[in-house]
Image (tube, coloured by chain):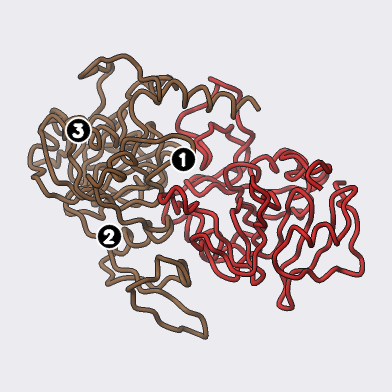
Chain colours: A brown, B red
Amino acid sequence: MPINKIMPSFDEAVADIPDGATIMIGGFGTVASTASLLLEALVRKGVKNLTTVSNSCGFGKDVWKLMGAKFPEDMDVLVRNNCIKKAIASAPVSAVYQNNFEKKLRAGEVELEMVPQGTLAERIRAAKAGLGGVYTPVGTGTAVEEGKETKIIDGKKYILELPIKADFALIKAHKADRWGNLVYRYSSRTFNGTMAGAAKVTIAEVDEIVELGELAPDEIHTPGIYVDRLVVRPEKYEEADEAEISQDAKESHEKYLERKSA
Amino acid sequence: MEDKFKLDRETMALRVAKEFQDGNYVNLGIGIPVLAANYIPVGREVVFQSENGILGFGEITTLGEGDPDLVNAGGQTVRPAPGMSAFDHAESFTMIRGGHLDISVMGGFQVSEKGDLANYMVPERKIGSIGGAMDLAVGAKRLIVVMNHVTKDGKPRVVRKCTYHITAIESVNLLVTDIAVIEITDNGLVLKEVAPGWTPEEVQSLTEPTLIVDPDCHEIELM
């Protein structure tokens, strides 16, 4: 039978993600690099107690709507709907905007494990590559070193960092074929490319599905072996709960515009 | 000294950019560092890296014009440019951690006399983001920190020992502040340049550790 990883809907793509699962969320922090509709489907399913693995922890759809994003939900949709128990992230909070994650963290409603960004990438890659961990010089002499095994190699101190294993990876790509070969656009590859294949099941949300053979072998960024499911974005976005844009988001956007024009 | 002339953000960025040599690969942090991209010395080709996975990108776009799939680490949209490449995060930090970047420029809260850097969390806030700072501080061949010399209430940021959370130990090579340029050496902090109208003694009085005044210490040169 021909391989076909294409799922008919976002809800079906996430249907078997249980409460308490560990999920990797691709992207860098911008909504364009985020599997926005898969995250919304997870909320519709009503999952609880997730452990998430991601670079940042979301700004919220209001911020992205003001920036003109077509699909505006980022990881904040999981945060504000109380789906998360613990986040493993490198940049969970912003210096200029208090996100919902920071509010919940201060209220003691979520746990956080903060990981330097390169270490996060390498711990994910270790899981993907079947390694027992990596030794990195990053974090020596800082809070990151506490409680970890260290080793002197060639006169330099390294910290042993263990792989981050996950049940599901939710990633965003630009184009795919039915085998799951993926192509990303520019800086939206980021953690999407790193996480593809790092979890037991990788689900990719894509802009477009093309015929097998249309993507040139040298053009493919993620070979299909790393991808289990595909789901394509619709033409039109249907907002689940249409609400007024918050004052916080408006103020933050104003600040952003000032900073940019300065 | 409170009302004496201090360098503004753009001028600090201009001084930082003087450090970029022809052919350098450079990562610029959010804030003042990213402004340095506008002041590359004439005749030098400098390639910028952004930790979210792009190398050799163009300038920041004007409002509303950008491609949301092409942003720098601050989330600002940038233009594609000839020679630009894109890659995933593991590759990006292989580049950063593996010593392939010539220069990393970042902001700071405190720098110690040994070159320790604290820049990801202010103690009062209790929450901060490490982001890529630890990797960039450890991995680049040369780390330049740019920051104001003292805090808002006049306390030294150049300190004997950092009291804020440490980003990386013994990693800063050059410090550019709004009143001085200081090189961090094995012997200690060497004062190389002072802002116009400032004496080495005045800079020292706002600095916790003892500065070694370079015999050639002079007014900050911008060109």
Judging depth in this view, the residue of B110 and A217 nearest the camera is: B110
Q: Residue A149 — which label? A: none
Q: Residue A81 — which label? A: 3
- Mark 2 neighbour class, 10 Å CA radius: few under 14, some 14 to 19, many 20 or more: many
What is the quadrant of the N terminus of chain A in the image?
top left
Q: Earlier in the sequence, mark 3 or mark 1?
A: 3
Quadrant housing residue A257: top right
Q: Secondary structure at mark 3?
A: loop
Q: CA distance from mark 1 to mark 2?
A: 21 Å
Quadrant housing residue A46: top left
| Residue assigned mark 1 | A187
Q: Are marks 3 and 1 on the same chain?
A: yes
Judging depth in this view, the residue of A203 and A152 nearest the camera is: A152
Give the total number of marks visible in the rendering. Answer: 3
**Of labels 2 and 3, the one closer to you:** 3
* Contact flag, marks 1 and 2 (Cβ < 8 Å): no
Amino acid type of disc 1? Ser
| Residue assigned mark 2 | A128
The residue lying at 55 percent from left, 69 percent from top is B169
Q: Measured along the vertical axis of the image, is residue A68 above or below residue B153? A: above
